[in-house]
Image (cartoon, rainbow, N blue to C red):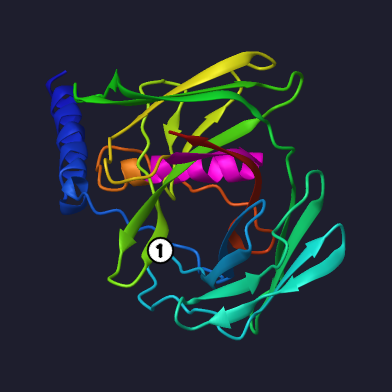
Amino acid sequence: MKYKIHISLLILLGFANLSCDEDSFSQVVTIDIPAHESALAVKALFQQSETELEVFLANSLGIIDKTDFDLQQDALVELFEDGQLIQTFQYDPARLSFIAKLDNGFGKAGASYRIQLSAEQYPIAQAIQAMPAAVPLISGQLKPGGAISEDGERVDAIELEFQDPIGEENYYGISATEKFTYFDGVDSVSYRSSTYLDSNDPLISFAGDGILIVSDKAFNGKKYKLLLYTYENSTADGITIQFLSMTKDMFLYYRSLDDYYEAKDNPFAEPVNVHSNIESGHGIFGVASQVEIKLE
């Protein structure tokens, strides 16, 4: 019996020694990262009636790449409407992007738009979007001092009411500009500047480019009133609201981009993939129709 006990103890000690070697306490895990195949990366967001379209084009990089992005200055950037070529973009070195100027403004409701990007050493990249129909605003009001910000500050309220089309998914964006006029010593000079918008409505999210976004999932087919606020600017000549009807891809890009920046410097947040709809590439191509209303 004693021999059996001694043997059992030796076996246990042997396992203990095996489990207590140097590697057992190591927290280093080696991961083989697959090689990254670089592709074209694009940002092309167009709004109806714009007379100038801009495309930013570079290449994608792997997670451990140490090289800089390569701006594709010699690329061919083309825009098609219902299968017909309507614009070939030209590279502008001052803006580091491709530009197309339009005499009559961009876009018509229901038309299909395809962007195609070609550059040496990369596969041809493309994406297709259908222009949504613009949804008109029923009313719009600016109420000075009519709202409270999330910080408890008295601010100007903006109320926008519209009828959401029934039986379809719709995605909206709201932005604003203000007109300023000054005297330069010879004449009066006017210019427009983006206006900061915010909202206490939980359905409304921030997006890039100074836009708020909302989908119709909570009010499909119903009237809805957007409650926004802005900060008073006594030198501005009224506020102009741009009410966008955007494609789902454009909405998902803006939504995921905001999620990405929220998680970027948070070590406890899960990584966020920014939405992409580019075939054989990366990035976003989106279009939006719009209506405008001036609030005074």
Q: Position of residue 158 (x, y in %)?
A: 42, 26
Residue at the front extreme of this rendering = 186
Q: Position of residue 294 (x, y in %)?
A: 51, 37
User: Residue at horizontal 44%, vertical 81%?
Assistant: 94
Q: Nearer the viewer, residue 37 or 289?
A: 289
Q: Position of residue 241 (x, y in %)?
A: 50, 38
Q: Is residue 288 left or right of residue 151?
A: right
Q: Amino acid at mark 1?
A: Ile
Magenta stretch? 239-260
Residue 102 lies, with reference to residue 152, above or below; the image says below
Res 211 seen here: no
Count residues near mark 1 (Cα–Cα under 10 Å), then give few for <14, some for 14-19, many for 20+: few
Say which quarter of the image contains residue 69. bottom left
User: Residue at horizontal 66%, vertical 50%?
Assistant: 287
Q: Nearer the viewer, residue 119 or 13?
A: 119
Q: Position of residue 90 (x, y in %)?
A: 63, 80
